């Protein structure tokens, strides 16, 4: 049975959800809602097959003879095992980090049914709980390979996500970073298809589940999207989705209530898409370096280290 370390408790999560809703910009609050939200995510992700064709591992020959793997946001657990399959014989420990205890439970069950690797789960937000997460990881006394899959890093400004990833790593650690890509020819046309999926009934069965957890019956018909260029880092496109409240609405989080007026919009997803040839530039800007990547068509896996990385 997996060991469980709790850094972010229920009260902390509720406060963070409340703060994001007050700001009108949801990120990890999208995973608010317990088991129904976790199941909705796993169902949606399993149906979205192209995102999980992680059947390769770039630069496996660079890794040491034994190490631990840290999956930041493991989802169902399936992407993690697909990525590390070629290097499974060198993995000594597997650590899962997620804001949702229920998501961790789903991942634990899948991984423990598929492998005998020791599993530890940490309930935490890797963007906000850097120091306690790193303290928990230091006890392993192993080089670590961090996984940030599913385009998770692109759900935030890269100043925030890349800086956090760099801060979690020491000079002997590696990072497998999964980033969504856009084609250099007609990028807006291609990205519009993704934007349409994000606001589809299929995706919103998970994407709007957090609103149902706040006591609101939300329909995908009240969502819309826009595609813009990143104002902070040129060459990156952002797909942003919004929910427009059709009536005056009160949301409940713990003991708190928040009010949204009819027509008011709530941003519930940002997803960035990259030109694969420019990713090294962004990594360098935020303290990381790339040792290579594997192009998987609509996304790519980049093997990264810090600027002070020591290659074994």
Image: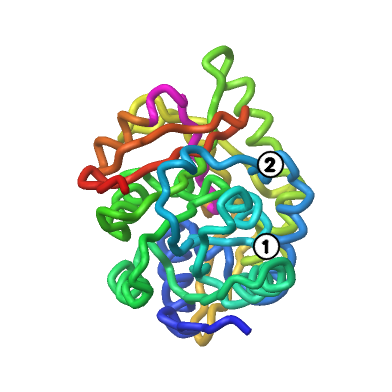
Residue indicated by mark 2: 53
Q: Residue at x 39, y 33 (%)?
A: 230
- x, y percent for residue 182: 54, 25
Residue indicated by mark 1: 76
Residue 219 within the magenta-colored segment of the rendering: no
Judged left or right of residue 73, residue 172 is: left
Q: Nearer the viewer, residue 56 or 167?
A: 56
Q: Nearer the viewer, residue 93 or 213?
A: 93
Which residues are drawn in magenta? 268-279
Query: Tag 2: Cα neighbours inside 10 Å, few (<14), some, or many (≥20)?
Result: few
Q: CA distance from mark 2 to mark 1?
A: 14 Å
Earlier residue among tags 2 and 1: 2
Q: For numbered disc 2, what is the local secondary structure? A: loop
> Which quadrant of the view contains residue 141?
bottom left
Judged left or right of residue 255, residue 222 is: right
- x, y percent for residue 261: 55, 60
Residue found farthest to the top: 185
In the rendered image, the quadrant that contains the N terminus is bottom right
């Amino acid at each position: 049975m997996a060991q469980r370390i709790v850094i972010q408790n229920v009260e902390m999560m509720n406060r963070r959800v409340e703060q994001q809703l007050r700001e009108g910009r949801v990120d990890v609050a999208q995973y608010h809602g317990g088991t129904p939200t976790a199941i909705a995510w796993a169902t949606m992700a399993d149906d979205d097959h192209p995102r999980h064709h992680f059947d390769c591992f770039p630069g496996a020959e660079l890794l040491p003879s034994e190490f631990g793997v840290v999956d930041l946001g493991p989802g169902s657990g399936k992407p993690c095992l697909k990525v590390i399959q070629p290097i499974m014989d060198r993995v000594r420990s597997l650590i899962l980090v997620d804001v949702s205890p229920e998501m961790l439970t789903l991942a634990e069950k899948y991984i423990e049914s598929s492998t005998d690797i020791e599993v530890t789960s940490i309930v935490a937000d890797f963007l906000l709980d850097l120091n306690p997460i790193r303290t928990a990881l230091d006890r392993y006394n192993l080089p670590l390979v961090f996984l940030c899959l599913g385009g998770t890093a692109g759900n935030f400004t890269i100043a925030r996500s890349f800086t956090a990833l760099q801060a979690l790593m020491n000079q002997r650690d590696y990072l497998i970073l999964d980033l969504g890509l856009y084609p250099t020819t007609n990028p807006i046309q291609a990205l519009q298809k993704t934007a349409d999926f994000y606001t589809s009934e299929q995706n919103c069965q998970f994407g709007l589940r957090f609103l149902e957890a706040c006591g609101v019956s939300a329909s995908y018909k009240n969502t819309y999207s826009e595609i813009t260029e990143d104002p902070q880092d040129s060459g990156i496109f952002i797909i942003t989705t919004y929910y427009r409240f059709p009536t005056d609405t009160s949301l409940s989080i713990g003991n708190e209530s928040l009010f949204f007026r009819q027509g008011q919009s709530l941003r519930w997803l940002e997803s960035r898409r990259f030109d694969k040839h420019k990713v090294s530039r962004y990594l360098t800007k935020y303290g990381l370096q790339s040792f290579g990547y594997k192009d998987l068509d609509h996304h790519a896996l980049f093997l990264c280290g810090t600027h002070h990385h020591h290659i074994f």
